[in-house]
Amino acid sequence: MIRLEAVGTMVRLRYKLMWAKTRSRNGKIALFIAGYTLLVLVMILLGAGGLGAGVLAIRSGKAELAAAAVLGGLYVQALLGTIMLGFGLNAVFADVELRRYPLNQWERRVSRHLIGIIDPFWLLILILQLGLAAGLYVLGDFNLLFILAAVLLLFVSNYLLARVVSGAIERLVSMKSGSALLMVLVMCLALLPGTLIPVISKDPNALRTLIGVLRWTPPFGAAAAMTRSGTAALTGLAVICAWLIGLAVILGYLENLAPRSSGGQSTTLTWESPFERAGALFGNNAPLVAFWLRFYARNNRFRALYALSIPLVSFFTFNFRHGFVKKASAMADDPERLFIAALGAIFMVGFFGSSRMAVNQFGYVGGSFRRFFLLPTDPAASLRTGSYACVFVGSLLIPVALLLWLVFGGPFDARKLIMLLGSAFTGLFFLHGAGLWVSLYGPRKGKYSAAMGNDMSLMGNLVVIFGMLGALIAPQVLFKTFPAAVSPQNWWLALPFAAVAIGFYTVSLRATTTLLPTKREELLAVVEGRVQSK
Amino acid sequence: MNPQADAIRVTNLMKKYGQTLAVESLSLNVPAGSMFGFLGPNGSGKSTTIGCLTGLLDPTAGSVEILGKPFTADSADLKRRMGVMPETLGLFDPLYAHEFLAFVGRMFGLDEAVTRQRVTELLAALELTDTSKTLSEYSTGMRKRVAFAAAVIHKPDVLFLDEPFESIDPAGVALMKQWLRRFTEHGRTVFITSHVLETVERLCTEVAIVTKPGKLVWQGDITVLANEGAIEYQGREFRALEPLFLHLTGERYADLNWL
């Protein structure tokens, strides 16, 4: 029995807490900007996105396939957005927090997921889907009831799938060898399109088989329900409902799993560890660097993102190999394009894994932040060593990425290797340099134990998202507008970029460590949760 | 008073958070080798004062001297001679107790052999021998013990303890008191805040009482109380610390009929 009134009270409390953040002048300005941006986004997405797709679907004469492709794309994008950037996964209330209130198990569960699904991220996904629905309804002769039911069910299944995948990842990375297993799984998934596409392009039957399989997925089920009638439409809805039930059962199972304990009692003290050995490379800073390395390595989010770094770079390299050029054009087959895509993707390899920590150095330390100032060292040592540790662990992935390029990147060309190395170093130092500034001016209280979710500040999100997008787009733009800049003939151009990035990092490190003592009380208030995050 | 004999000297200390005054012109001297109790009601600026005395916060005005030397947040040499147990404990939750204590020992310049020996001894003495749990999995009392161990591992000359006995079981408290007494017998100083006035009365030799906003209202020797004596203040005699504290900070009474 679920008391909807109790659930409603919790949902209202979530919005009261959100509203409380806007009580300050800055909060009101932020609310206005966020509201305005959301409104504009809604209009753009509804008009140019989903609605446009709906119109195209009708005009193409292949409404079901076009709708399935659009819905499938949205479905996957929403999933990637939640997994890679953590959007739409901030639970607000954990189950343990809701246990303080007189709510039963089901009321707690419904409250949490209701609050989760009305996150702005999911609302944007819903708007895109509704846009497509509007396009299909206005121009086509389809059943409005089926269209709306399909959109809503698809939307809920998308949310549930994101929760299931993130829950599974969370569970996986909390296991000892889970990160490695995750990396293998994601590598397989990243390489799947590259394996399937040549097969499909050679054998038309393979494409038909693939579509036949995909018909049993929620986006294709929704497309059938939206564009067909009678039994076919009902079958489409039944497919989504079956997925909903399955996902709800799996999610319930994952949520009911007991947290992993560290095992039985032990009295063995271990003094030597790889963290101390790696920390020793940093001379006087050894204990602090070792501390940070240990702090990162025990963080599930760090381990998940670190494990995803190489698969992500492989995925972007492969998927951006066509750049902005239509696949049919002669330029798309240019073998150099794989290199251009790799040049952009490798930029983030040394940053992505440590990105959450790098842009919020003290956010996950919480109240322990004050411990740094009790230590007999200069107060800025904590920031400096934290950044050293981030750069160090990030740099370890660069040789791995280069090795993969040597294996899969075609004929050996030392110039390309130097350019890739230059790009990786540029990204490593430039983004970590930016992270230092964000750690100081855009801190946010984070939850160390959470493996998923986006708890970065606005500035942190800007650095991570625009850093990644910029890295992917810049080489493509240069290739189109000024190809000499990314040509192996001018391989040496990568070196000044790397030198400038190292210079930026050095200057940022000096400046931020000088500023830290003056900012520490402000930082302390934010990371301890006494002041609202920016 | 001989300035050489003061382990801590605070002169006109003021701390403001924006427009809010947390500590108002506080001056006090803590004799070396004393067990000094620093008392005050909630929100009276005790933790802010400790923050200023340990380098966590920068005073808005005034000065602090520790062991005869001016103290600021950058005084690394002085910090090496100080031990601090903050109210919020400041533990790094993902670490195991021995890892955390070893980290603190190394940071305070102990060599590896001494660090390992002291960590092992402290963990055994404080009954923190289960190394399968990280600090986040420890109970509040166990976390307090770890924070206490971190404050003393480098054998400091001045020890700051913010509410050290809360949440610790009686056996643990007795052990800590025994250590603290031995600590001061060797001429070292303990600066302690607590709301448990009975403990302060039995443990401390001198006490300072502050009211909002960090204003000193009384400082004096309380050893007379342990000898069945009395403290005289404004013509009244106080035979225990609690009535004196309530007299200075204001008694409150509110009746809730429904309770």
Image (spheres, grey):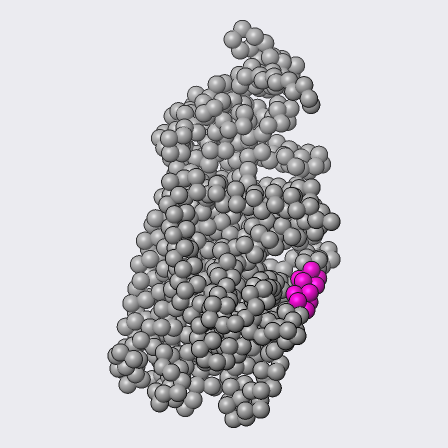
Give the left or right position of residue A154, taking residue A481 as reference: right
Q: Residue furthest top?
A: B235
In the displayed structure, B243 sits above or below B51; it is above
**Near-viewer residue (A305 or A40):** A40
Q: Give the range drawn in magenta.
A: A241-253
Percent of width and height locating residue A410: 43, 89
Residue placed furthest toward the front: A141
Does residue A437 show up?
A: yes
Give the overall secondary structure of the magenta segment: helix
Residue A362 x/y as whole percent: 46, 51
Q: Please report the residue visible at 43 percent of the width from the left and 28 percent of the height from the top.
A: B23
Closest to the observer, B31 or B22: B22
- Left or right of residue A534, residue B163 in this image: right
Q: In this view, does A82 lie above or below B251?
A: below
Q: Does the magenta stretch include residue A91?
A: no
Residue A390 in the image, given as x and y percentages of width and height = 45, 62
At x 43%, y 21%, the residue is B1
Q: In this view, does B257 lie above or below A176?
A: above
User: Which residue does the image show at 36% across and 87% down from the upper left?
Assistant: A329
x and y percent of residue A69 in the render? Answer: 51, 76
The answer to which image quadrant residue A332 occupies is: bottom left
Q: Nearer the viewer, residue A180 or A131?
A: A131
Residue B10 is left or right of residue A197, and the answer is left
